[in-house]
Amino acid sequence: MQRFTSAFIREQRGEKNKVDPFRPYAFLVEPECGSGGEVQDVATLFLTNRECPFTCLMCDLWKNTLDSRIPVGAIPQQIDYALERLPAAQSIKLYNSGNFFDPQAIPPDDYPAIAQRMAGFQTVIVENHPRLVGPRCLEFQRLLPAGVELEVAMGLETIHPEALAALNKEMTADDFARAASFFNENDIAMRAFVLLKPPFLSEAEGLEWALKSTEFAFDLGVRTVAIIPTRGGNGVMEQLAGSNDFSPPSLGSLEAVLDAGLAMRRGRVFVDLWDAEKLVECPACGPKRIERLQNINLAQQCVKRVGCSACRSSDM
């Protein structure tokens, strides 16, 4: 499999979007099935901060980041700005296009102010690279108000060794396992991001390795797996598409990975439906199939697939 350097990947990118260090670049409230099976509202804040130091092949999150460290106090201001404009929610995601425990992204001096703002939420979910797991996680956990659970989301992506190396994520499955062990020892919940059909894998291989990666995550104590259809949008992925080394997964694969993941009965499994419309090949059944996936995400229960005479897809 072809390997690209971080410098090359960055050279293929377009321009970043203009963002304000004192404002989140997006925020919303969305429903999600909670750990107890109930549907809860989750406030999702996309915080503006310095770009992630890791240059992953498939990542397009750099588009809404800064080139420099933001001042102390900016992140609490961003949180206030969003929460003042959002309806009440039971849990909160503080996603920052990178790593919450990277001190160049989220200043540790802001941890007390951030933690104070988590009062009233059941769970606060942050994202972080497995290689940046350590004492800062515990520091933030200790600062959270009583009753607020910390959950850390990490990108596992795939346990296919060659494909993972080709993603330039600068980690191995063993790195993920070490991070998981740390969180298990310190009673910190985990979710994992798994890619469906990363570059260099066929459709069948993409499905197979997404399920193997999901099983691997559950074996390590991960409670929730979010499966993300691999997509383009950052330059080098378009080059790989041109050389037939990448194409997005089919909607059928997305359906299959959710059905099979939930059949494991080992934890919550979600599929990311952002831009799922681009995976639709049949306009007659595509919208109904996406609606089915949305309903399964919320209920965590599989239902009969949508049949379609136009494209000959069948119920199951």
Image (tube, grey):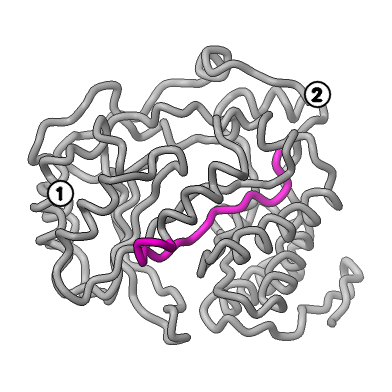
Does 127 sit left or right of 227 as displayed?
left
Residue under pointer 1: 111
Tell me the residue at 75%/21% (across/down): 2
Q: Which mark is residue 38?
A: none
Residue under pointer 2: 243
Q: Residue furthest front?
A: 185
What quarter of the picture does the N terminus occupy?
top right
User: Disc 2 on helix, strand or loop?
Assistant: loop
Queried whether the magenta region covers residue 276, the answer comes back as: no
Q: Position of residue 13 (x, y in %)?
A: 51, 21
Q: Position of residue 299 (x, y in %)?
A: 55, 84
Does 177 sit left or right of 186 as displayed?
right
**Considering depth in this image, is 84 or 194 the residue closer to the camera?**
194
User: Disc 1 on helix, strand or loop?
Assistant: helix
- The magenta stretch is 184-198
Name the amino acid type tagged 1. Answer: Tyr
Number of residues whose C-alpha sits closer than 10 Å to that of mark 1, classed few (under 14), some (14–19) or many (20 or more): many
Tell me the residue at 20%/51% (across/down): 139
Foreground disc of the pair 1, 2: 1
Up-down: is 107 above or below 258? above
**Considering depth in this image, is 143 or 316 the residue closer to the camera?**
143
Q: CA distance from mark 1 to mark 2?
A: 45 Å
Q: Which mark sits nearer the N-terminus, 1 or 2? A: 1
Figure disc tally = 2
**Considering depth in this image, is 259 or 16 the residue closer to the camera?**
259
Q: Position of residue 225 (x, y in %)?
A: 56, 63
Tell me the residue at 57%/48% (across/down): 156
Number of residues whose C-alpha sits closer than 10 Å to that of mark 2, classed few (under 14), some (14–19) or many (20 or more): few
Queried whether the magenta region covers residue 192, the answer comes back as: yes
Up-down: is 125 above or below 297? above
Does 130 sit left or right of 261 as displayed?
left
